[in-house]
Amino acid sequence: MKDLGQIILSGFNYNRDKFLLFLVVLISTILMMKGLDLALDRDQVFCILGIFLIENFLTCGVYGSLKKILSGEKLTPQVFLKNCVNFFIRFLIIKIFFVISIVFISGIILILIEAAGKIPSVPAATGIVFLWLIWLSFPMYYLILSLFAPMVLFSENSGIWQSIKTSISFSRIFFSKIIIIGFLYFISVLVFVYFPEKSYNLSSGLWYFCKGVLVSIMEIGFISSFLLLYQKGWDNERNV
């Protein structure tokens, strides 16, 4: 746990290059939040799709550059743009894979619940639901373990399938630490962004800026923590 605390502190330890990436995330976050709000209000499907593609492009540049910075390299415009282009397709495919998998599993669960509700016998319905949940637990288990694949992708510059396989192997060993960082990330967003916005119905320009700052700080810090966990975790395993 002490090592994990040091990893998280290192993730939030900003230098010049990480601050520049913070500015990229801040500006893009504010612009995309505004653009997405306008596109949703006007039902502009192609605008929404364009915003998500731009977000994917910039995220590749930020995450790929973070990996370089954490490895001791310097950030340059060329490095940033190279990462944007290099990881764009693979990162997009991985995200689409996760979305399709989650929708597919959720769809099966909804169909199962609806079908079970039509069975007059409660014990029979309960038994069927239980058996299906046992069957679904297998793909859900591997899907959860593969969620670390983007961090592997940016760390190793590996292929899609190799990133997923390595994610499963790594997550089996370091699952508790991944969960702790992910939980802290989730709680931070709830406490500092979601709850204040919903509680006080915040929507001013000043709140958009503050929200962008908070989201950007957390994204840079926690993604750096994930990347450092992967790097140091594998190093420790190899030295054992």
Image: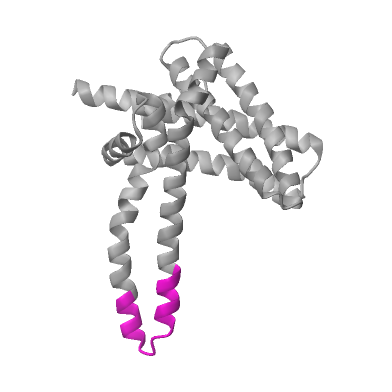
Q: Is residue 78 above or below residue 231?
A: above
User: Residue 112: x and y, percent?
Assistant: 40, 73
Q: Is residue 194 above or below residue 149?
A: below
Q: Quadrant of residue 126?
A: bottom left
> Any magenta on residue 124?
yes
The residue at 74%/37% (across/down) is: 208
Q: Is residue 133 above or below residue 2?
A: below
Question: The C terminus is located in which quarter?
Answer: top left
Question: The N terminus is located in which quarter?
Answer: top left
User: Residue 224: x and y, percent?
Assistant: 47, 26
User: Residue 39: x and y, percent?
Assistant: 72, 46
Can residue 15 be seen from the camera position used here?
no
Q: Quadrant of residue 216?
A: top right
The residue at 46%/42% (across/down) is: 95
Residue 150 shown left or right of residue 238 in the figure: right
Can residue 162 be seen from the camera position used here?
yes
How many marks the image carries: the answer is 0
The residue at 35%/43% (across/down) is: 146
As drawn, which residue projects farthest toward the left?
240
> Any magenta on residue 36?
no
Between residues 1 and 202, which one lies in front from this camera angle?
A: 202
The residue at 34%/41% (across/down) is: 176
Q: Main secondary structure of the magenta part?
A: helix
Magenta segment: 110-128
Between residues 161 and 109, which one lies in front from this camera angle?
A: 161
Residue 54 shown left or right of residue 118 in the figure: right
User: Residue 25: x and y, percent?
Assistant: 62, 28
